[in-house]
Image: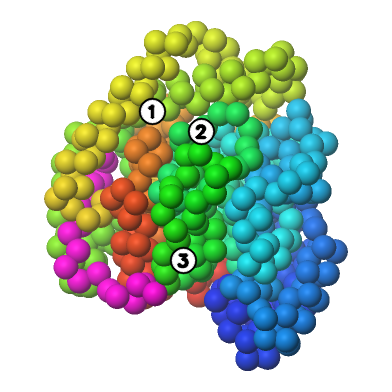
């Protein structure tokens, strides 16, 4: 039973607890055994809280027996190591915070625990979540379960690898430029960046205040909908969060997508290149929505690339946040960061203000598209997972795609715009390369409209199931 138990969804676990077929104690023990076996191969978890988890499982078992179970009673989850956890080390993947132990939970952790969720531990990320791979000087590389010589993506790469490898059914992440969607794509699972402010973000280190979205990675769309029902909703500790209460997201998943208007863009008008296998798989997946009753059109967008603006804003805010410790950071920083830390010093106040002007223009360009379409589909990443298995820091990304030279973020051009605009966007598994590497399709929705994104993702999941596919962990 334990071999199959670890592949059960959160919703299935709850059903098994309800029927008495399974207990939370059995579930936590099975996941603990799986972590012990698999985590040394992929380095997804960097801190474990299994004794606390076993105690919580015993309490959850009693709650089910006494018919007072909460919405997530007994469901194990993992937490990205830049999300605050009371009494549990939270390092942000940095030597500067190697011994940092918060005295409070982040709102999202607080809500999952209050709903009966059981935290198994913390997952790896790149230092301060700044790049799209997952490795740092504190814990080393996290590896992709589909090929351990390749990256799982980032920055929520530890969370994605843990879910993909059957170490937990649900893992928390956050997304300031693609950090949920990128690893979801490279690890072959579902990842949703909810609308900005849908899930409160507090407390957190300075920076990223207008870009970061709290979310989750799961193997099924329904599990993410369940997560949102528990985690979404206003909280006065986050002045930027949305005031709207959470919806019954799972209720509408079976409503279907007939009549939806879907735009498909292979390049958003600026992506320099896309791997041919990725491009072909996403195109086929996008137009498969016609079989579900949708109107799908390929569109030519002329969106301005937000890459330079994203780099300007993120580096300026990050360096400002650590201004008093900048020299100490340089002595301890992930080596590939050093050129960027020097670059941040040349940005002026005008440069940062100009980003906000461009941000308004970006939404005007996208708003025009979303006045005609309900959803926009693109590739999630321009490439599948790439190799990292080499001495020292691995590459931040390929420099050549389909014979064309690209810049440092040229392999992730599709995710950035929706952090600037705040729109919800998800990565959905849509196929594999000939080498057996997952490919992700990005589905972006209109402002405040996670519901339609989730409906479309669920319809695609029903038509093209993926959860039965499991990584070989070679």
- Reading the chain from its start, which is encountered first: label 1 or label 2? 2
Q: Position of residue 284 (x, y in %)?
A: 26, 61
Q: Is residue 343 magenta?
A: no
Q: Residue at x 30, y 52 (%)?
A: 445
Q: Which residue is mark 3?
A: 225
**Considering the image in quadrants, where does the N terminus appear?**
bottom right
In the image, is 7 to the left or to the right of 375? right
Q: Is residue 236 visible?
A: yes
Q: Earlier in the sequence, mark 1 or mark 3?
A: 3
- What residue do we see at 73% from left, 87% from top? 65
Q: Which mark is residue 385?
A: none
Q: Is residue 202 left or right of residue 198?
A: right
Could you classify mark 3 by the number of other residues whose Cα lies within 10 Å: few (under 14), some (14-19), or many (20 or more)? many
Indicate the position of residue 191 as horizontal and vertical percent values: 47, 56
Q: Quadrant of residue 139?
A: top right
Q: Which residue is mark 1?
A: 307
255 drawn magenta: yes
Count of labels in the image = 3
How many neighbours does mark 2 have within 10 angstroms: few (below 14), some (14-19), or many (20 or more)?
some
Q: CA distance from mark 1 to mark 2?
A: 18 Å
Residue 436, above or below 12: above
Is label 1 or label 2 in front? 2
Q: Which residue is mark 2?
A: 209
Q: Which residues are the magenta region?
A: 251-268
User: How many angstroms separate mark 1 from mark 3 (CA)?
Assistant: 30 Å
């Amino acid at each position: 039973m334990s071999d199959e138990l670890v592949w059960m969804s959160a919703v299935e676990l709850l059903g098994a607890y309800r029927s008495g077929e399974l207990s939370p104690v059995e579930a936590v023990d099975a996941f603990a055994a799986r972590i012990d076996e698999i985590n040394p191969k992929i380095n997804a978890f960097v801190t474990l809280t299994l004794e606390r988890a076993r105690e919580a499982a015993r309490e959850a078992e009693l709650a089910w027996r006494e018919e007072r179970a909460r919405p997530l009673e007994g469901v194990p989850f993992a937490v990205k190591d830049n999300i605050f956890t009371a009494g549990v080390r939270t390092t942000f993947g940095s030597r500067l915070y190697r011994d940092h132990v918060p005295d409070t939970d982040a709102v999202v952790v607080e809500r999952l625990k209050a709903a009966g969720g059981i935290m198994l531990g913390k997952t790896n990320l790149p230092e301060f979540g700044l790049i799209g791979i997952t490795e740092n000087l504190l814990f080393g590389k996290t590896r992709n379960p589909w090929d351990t010589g390749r990256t799982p993506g980032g920055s929520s790469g530890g969370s994605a690898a843990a879910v993909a490898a059957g170490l937990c059914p649900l893992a928390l992440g956050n997304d300031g430029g693609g950090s949920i969607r990128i690893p979801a794509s490279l690890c072959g699972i579902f990842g949703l960046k909810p609308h900005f402010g849908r899930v409160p973000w507090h407390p957190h280190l300075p920076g990223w205040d207008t870009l970061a979205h709290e979310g989750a990675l799961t193997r099924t769309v329904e599990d993410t909908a369940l997560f949102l029902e528990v985690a979404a909703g206003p909280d006065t500790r986050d002045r930027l969060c949305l005031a709207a209460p959470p919806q019954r997201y799972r209720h509408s998943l079976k409503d279907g997508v007939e009549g939806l208007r879907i735009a498909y863009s292979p390049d958003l008008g600026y992506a320099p290149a896309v791997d041919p296998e990725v491009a072909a798989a996403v195109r086929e997946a996008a137009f498969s929505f016609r079989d579900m009753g949708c109107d799908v059109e390929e569109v030519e967008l002329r969106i301005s690339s937000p890459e330079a603006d994203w780099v300007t804003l993120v580096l300026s805010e990050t360096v400002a946040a650590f201004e008093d410790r900048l020299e100490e950071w340089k002595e301890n920083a992930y080596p590939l960061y050093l050129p960027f830390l020097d670059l941040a010093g040349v940005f002026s106040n005008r440069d940062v203000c100009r980003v906000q002007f461009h941000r308004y223009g970006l939404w005007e360009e996208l708003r025009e598209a979303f006045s005609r379409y309900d959803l926009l589909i693109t590739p999630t990443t321009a490439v599948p997972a790439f190799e990292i298995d080499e001495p020292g820091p691995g590459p931040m990304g390929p420099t050549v795609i389909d014979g064309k030279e690209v810049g440092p973020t040229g392999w992730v051009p599709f995710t950035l715009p929706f952090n600037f605009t705040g729109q919800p966007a998800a990565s959905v598994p849509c196929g594999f390369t000939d080498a057996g590497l997952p490919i992700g399709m990005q589905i972006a929705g209109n402002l405040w409209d996670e519901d339609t994104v989730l409906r479309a993702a669920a319809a695609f999941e029903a038509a093209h199931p993926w959860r039965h596919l499991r990584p070989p962990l070679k």
